Image (cartoon, rainbow, N blue to C red):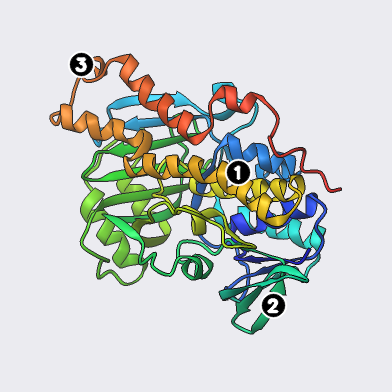
Amino acid sequence: MRIAIAGGGIGGLTAALALHAAGHRDVRVFEAAAELRPLGVGLNILPSAVRELHALGLAPAVEGHAVTTAELAFYTRRGDLVWSEPRGRFAGHRFPQYSLHRGLLQQDLADAVAARLGHGTVETGRPVTGYTVHDDSASGTTVTVHTGSGDVEADLLIGADGLHSAVRAAMHPDDGEPDTNGMWMWRGTSRAAPFLTGASMAVLGDDRAKFVVYPIRPADESGLALINWVTGRPADGPSAAQGLADRKKEVLAQFGDWKVPWTDVPGLVAAASQIHEYPMLDRAPLPTWNDGPVTLIGDAAHPMYPVGSNGATQAIIDGRAVAWHLHDAPDVPTALRRYESERLPATRGVQEANRRMGPERVIDLAWQRAPEGFDRIEDVFTAEELQRISDDYASTAGFTVEALDADSPYGTGEPR
């Protein structure tokens, strides 16, 4: 079977590896960027996705440069603890949660694709711009994949081309522009001393402004770690900041007076080696991801607000799931229907939960209920309410202990 993948990001590369493991050898990945380089900032991979990386034999490479996340903690902007919980193996899961640099994860996947499928598998500088489905009674349903440098014939096209997916746009031409909640994010990385457990992910603030911080590389011999941080606040549009120095001033104007006992928020901003600015965007869930021999995965299928560490996590699971169903079903249409019926409802639930700010809503509620602060969190929440908020999101996102005690539903992932 001739398989084309639009997009060489985390979802597309995972799908290529999973398809190879399922026995497919004619796989081509079309990537718009001129080259794959380790760009970007930090992300988290939840245990549900680490399990799939483990099945593909990738976990040792990833763990070599990741932080094994110990806890997730929520604080007010004054640094008062609202809620904390252990994560990954520290919470009893079989698999860890990783905090790491997005570009290094993509490089791990790209290196594995080159080693297993061949160095020419990923064709850079070749964006997919659309497709045409053909239903021929003699040869079955095929698809012409339109790229920036000529058409390609395939039996299956997987759209893994992100938030602004050309494959999604061709499938759903009335989809329109992404949705926004009016929040803008500034994301940066800084070398600084580890904080709390040394492997903590912390979310501070309220519904007016948030600061998320976690290490993405372990501390080196100097005692400093690479720290990823993200700020969010309501804004009408992009700032006028030009360059790193201006972006630092922009962020410090909002967060320069935040004082937390266990880390230096303004110091992290001032030490940043890079700062990127983004609107917080998602898209409404689709009624279908399939169009004949074409399907969607990752942000092309279900872009979601960056809450709860689920963007890359769900893309990895999608890549494994679509490959599994292609192996397990008698034909492509049946495989894609089964893939969609499993993954579309699951990811819709995460999208909707993220629109409600997922587990981060505990700090929103803390500010709404106690805007002047509190001495005891028990005066603001019952322990049962806090636990319920956490458990509800874990259940929606599929990373309860019960869900992860079992082996992957998509097999071992070992090449056939």
List the residue tagged with mark 1.
Answer: 66
Name the residue located 66 percent from the left edge and 36 percent from the top edge: 51
**Left or right: 320 as drawn, with respect to 399:** right
From the image, state whether disc 2 or disc 3 is nearer to you.
2
**Position of 116 compared to 287: left or right?**
right
251 vs 288, nearest the viewer: 288
Residue sitting at x 37%, y 21%:
388
Percent x, y of residue 331: 74, 54
Q: Please, what secondary structure does the residue beneath circle 2 have?
A: strand
Alpha-carbon distance for marks 2 and 1?
37 Å
Labels 1 and 3: the sequence-earlier one: 1
Given the current orientation, which residue lies at the most extreme front position? 137
The secondary element bearing badge 3 is classed as helix
Q: Residue at x 46, y 33 (%)?
A: 396
Q: For the residue marked with disc 3, what is the amino acid?
A: Asp
Front residue of 292/302: it is 292
Whether label 2 touches label 3, CB < 8 Å = no
Quarter of the view holding residue 294: bottom right
Between circles 2 and 1, the one closer to the viewer is 2
Label 1 vs label 3: CA separation? 38 Å
Q: Which quadrant of the rendered structure holds the N terminus?
A: bottom right
Are circles 2 and 1 on residues that touch, CB within 8 Å? no
Instruction: Tell me if I can see residue 219 in this picture.
Output: no
Residue at the right extreme, as displayed:
416
Task: For label 2, count other residues whose C-alpha is less than 10 Å away and answer few (under 14), some (14-19) or many (20+).
Answer: some
